[in-house]
């Protein structure tokens, strides 16, 4: 998986989208993208969210 970083603006926008969503699956996806964008490895994100690493990679 390619390492990438999100800008502060992107993180703020994603957090707003997270608060606005009513769909649990969408909220998990947004969480994963935010944490990945802050430089955490996919395995750490998967462990924290109690999901599979492959699932994180697909997000």
Image (cartoon, rainbow, N blue to C red):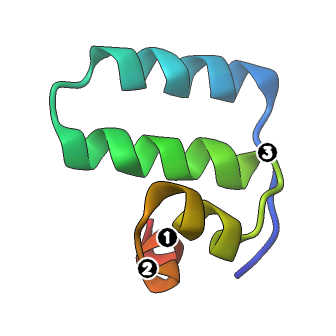
Please state which of the two labelled residues, at mark 3 or mark 2, is closer to the viewer.
2
Provide residue 44's location: percent of width, then percent of height.
Answer: 69, 66
Image quadrant where one finds the N terminus: bottom right
Q: Are marks 1 and 2 in contact (CB under 8 Å)?
A: yes
- In terms of secondary structure, where does tag 1 sit? helix
> Between disc 1 and disc 3, whose residue precedes?
3
Q: Position of residue 54 (x, y in %)?
A: 47, 85
Which SS class for mark 2?
Answer: loop
Residue found at x 78% / y 58%: 40
Residue under pointer 3: 38
Residue behind mark 1 = 56
Question: As displayed, is residue 1 above or below residue 45?
Answer: below
Q: Give me the C-alpha separation between circle 1 and circle 2.
A: 7 Å
Residue that appears at 72% across and 48% down:
37
Cα separation, mark 1 vs mark 3, equals 14 Å
**The quadrant where residue 24 appears:** top left
């Amino acid at each position: 998986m390619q390492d990438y970083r999100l800008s502060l603006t992107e993180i703020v926008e994603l957090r707003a989208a997270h608060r606005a969503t009513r769909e649990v699956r969408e909220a998990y996806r947004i969480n994963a993208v935010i944490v990945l964008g802050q430089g955490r490895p996919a395995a750490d994100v998967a462990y924290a969210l109690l999901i599979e690493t492959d699932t994180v990679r697909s997000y």
